[in-house]
Image: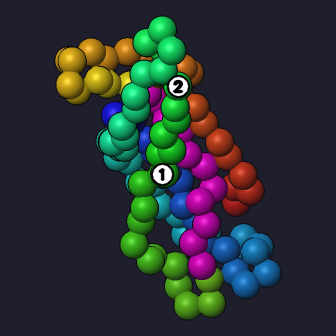
Amino acid sequence: MKRALAMAHYQCVNKGNKCPKASNRKDVPGPLVEPGSFSSGKNGAVNGSLTISPPEVAAFCPRGQHKVLASVDYTGIEIADVSNGVTEPGAPPALGAACCECP
């Protein structure tokens, strides 16, 4: 299982993907959990990956605009083996991505 804390930043853009004068924005925090099953291979090594999506937000943009994910930050990323009660920090323990923020 993979766990993390996330902060997603959404904003509204117009049909031309331009920032309107009154840029509506929403920040959405959330703890995230993504379950997964892995088995060990040769010599007990475990390889695998899990994908965590940013927290979603309900529609909030005015007519003629649509929401876009402008940035997301993940902190406290960790991997937990719930069967054996073992938790380890993720590699890396934090990630972030940003694109196209309105001024």
The quadrant in which the C terminus is found is bottom right
Q: Is residue 73 above or below residue 22?
A: above
Q: Residue at x 60, y 79 (%)?
A: 66
Residue range of the region highlighted in magenta in the rendering: 66-77
For this rendering, which residue is in front, 11 or 45?
45
Q: Residue at x 48, y 8 (%)?
A: 43
Task: Identify residue for label 2.
Answer: 47
What SS does tag 2 mark? loop
Q: Is residue 97 above or below residue 82?
A: below
* 90 with respect to 35 (left or right): right
* 84 with respect to 45 (left or right): left
Q: Residue at x 55, y 46 (%)?
A: 72
What kind of residue is marked 2?
A: Asn
Q: Is residue 93 visible?
A: no
Task: Identify residue for label 1.
Answer: 54
Q: Classify residue 67 by image quadrant.
A: bottom right
Question: Measured from the top left, where is residue 23 in percent x and y?
Answer: 61, 69
